[in-house]
Image (cartoon, helix red, strand yellow):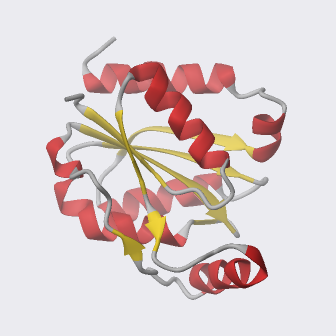
């Protein structure tokens, strides 16, 4: 078993794409956070909007992997209205006592990455060992590789695999 687990939430697929690339490149275990209720279409968007505006911790399906068994947990989520995606808030609240070390990456449309990282650290009550923010435009243009490489190098150091 790897000593690193990558856990992600993705509504549109951008965060999932980055998460899978990282996990594949590093051969790390990966787990996906899934909504208990649909976020597809206009009603899903409205649900997401209300969850973030009201600070809700929506229902999610339990992950398949126990994060407390890992030295480092890398959390990946999208940014919604300059806030951490609500399903990730639920996940962190559920597992924060089992985290040894955490890192965070996000995908976002243009603003709020720093705020989402702050929220992640605050909810987990732990400092982030590394952070990465990738815009939707960088994903569409495949212009994020230098930042991704730097993030992975930092994670390797934290995990003790330089």
77 relative to 140 in the view: left or right: left
Q: Residue 126: where, in percent of width, then height?
A: 29, 53
Image quadrant in which the N terminus is located = top left
- The residue nearer to you, when weighing 48 against 65, is 65
Q: Residue 102: where, in percent of width, then height?
A: 33, 44
Q: How many marks?
A: 0
- The residue nearer to you, when weighing 74 against 47, is 47
Q: Residue 88: where, in percent of width, then height?
A: 46, 64
Image quadrant in which the C terminus is located = top left
- From what the image shows, is residue 148 above or below residue 128? above
Q: Residue furthest top?
A: 162
- From what the image shows, is residue 38 above or below residue 145? below
- The residue nearer to you, when weighing 89 against 154, is 89
Q: Residue at x 69, y 73 (%)?
A: 40
Q: Residue 54: where, in percent of width, then height?
A: 57, 88
Q: Residue at x 61, y 56 (%)?
A: 78
């Amino acid at each position: 078993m790897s000593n690193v687990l990558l856990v992600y939430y993705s509504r549109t697929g951008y965060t999932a794409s980055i998460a899978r690339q990282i996990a594949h490149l590093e051969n790390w275990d990966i787990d996906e956070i899934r909504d208990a209720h649909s976020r597809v279409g206009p009603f899903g968007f409205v649900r997401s909007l209300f969850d973030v505006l009201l600070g809700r911790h929506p229902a999610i399906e339990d992950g398949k992997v126990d994060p407390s068994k890992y030295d480092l947990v890398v959390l990946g989520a999208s940014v919604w209205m300059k806030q951490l995606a609500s399903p990730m808030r639920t996940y962190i609240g559920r597992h924060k006592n089992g985290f040894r070390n955490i890192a965070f990456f996000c995908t976002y449309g243009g603003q709020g990455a720093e705020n989402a990282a702050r929220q992640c650290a605050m909810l987990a009550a732990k400092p982030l060992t590394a952070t990465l923010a990738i815009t939707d435009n960088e994903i569409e243009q495949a212009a994020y590789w230098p930042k991704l490489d730097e993030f992975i190098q930092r994670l390797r150091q934290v995990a003790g695999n330089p």
